[in-house]
Image (spheres, rainbow, N blue to C red):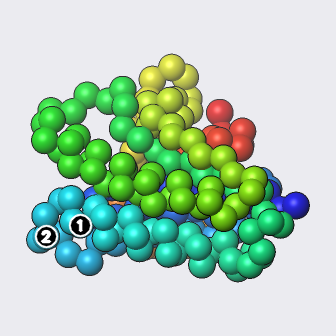
Amino acid sequence: MKSVLLSLDPSTTCTGIALWRGKKLVDVCKVRATSAKIAPVERAMKLALSCKDVCTEMIERIDKNPAKIRLSIVVEVPGGQSRPHSRGLVTLGFGVGATCMMLSNFGLVHPQFEFDMVPVSTWSRLRGKRCMSKVDRAELIRAKFDEVDWTQDKGHDIADAVGLGAWHLGLLK
């Protein structure tokens, strides 16, 4: 049985995805919304569906038979951060909720399936008790996983997906 982990940093405009086999980082990507000009709920649903399709393709590159894969999915969710605008948090909630809904369907085809949602404030306490800023986290994660081409990760979405997965696997402290 192959242990596979997908770790995701979702939003309503761009989602970072990291694929792990055991404790080895196998692939990374980001999925962008087709347009930022459509309503947030519609944009979130379309992005979540695209993420599900991309995740399916990534998993199938490891093995097309779901019975041979022990699949875990971990998704970053907002929590514990101070947000000056509650409207932004609600919009982000659309994106995270839609992504979680789409990805939870993997449980229908994978007999061994785990799904977890982790608040960013939980996993981002990497050096002490305070949450690291997104920029500081990205710097730490990029140094640890220098085999990744980080040039396309201006918003740190992939770095957060990699960081979340590494934290989940016990590779970051």
Q: Residue at x 13, y 64 (%)?
A: 39
Q: Nearer the viewer, residue 167 or 72?
A: 72
Residue density around tag 2, few if under 14, some if 14–19, many if 20 or more, within 10 Å: few
Give amino acid for label 2: Ile
Dividing the picture into quadrants, the one containing residue 32 is bottom left
Q: Quadrant of the N terminus?
A: bottom right
Q: Residue at x 21, y 42 (%)?
A: 90
Write down the residue under mark 2.
38
Secondary structure of the residue carrying numbered label 1: helix
The tag earlier along the polypeptide, 2 or 1, is 2
| Image coordinates for residue 116, horizontal then vertical, percent | 57, 41
The numbered disc on residue 43 is: 1
| Residue 110 visible in this rendered orientation of the protein | yes
Q: Quadrant of the C terminus?
A: top right
Left or right, 156 with reference to 55: left
The residue furthest front is 108
Marks 2 and 1, how far apart in space? 6 Å
Give amino acid for label 1: Arg
Q: Is residue 79 above or below residue 29?
A: above
| Residue 166 visible in this rendered orientation of the protein | no
Q: Nearer the viewer, residue 59 or 109?
A: 109
Q: Nearer the viewer, residue 160 or 72?
A: 72
Q: Is residue 116 above or below residue 84?
A: below
Q: CB of mark 2 within 8 Å of CB of mark 1?
A: yes
Left or right, 164 with reference to 43: right
Secondary structure of the residue carrying numbered label 2: loop
Residue density around tag 1, few if under 14, some if 14–19, many if 20 or more, within 10 Å: many
| Image coordinates for residue 117, horizontal then vertical, percent | 51, 40
Q: Is residue 162 above or below residue 147?
A: above
The residue furthest right is 1
Q: Is residue 173 above or below residue 68?
A: above
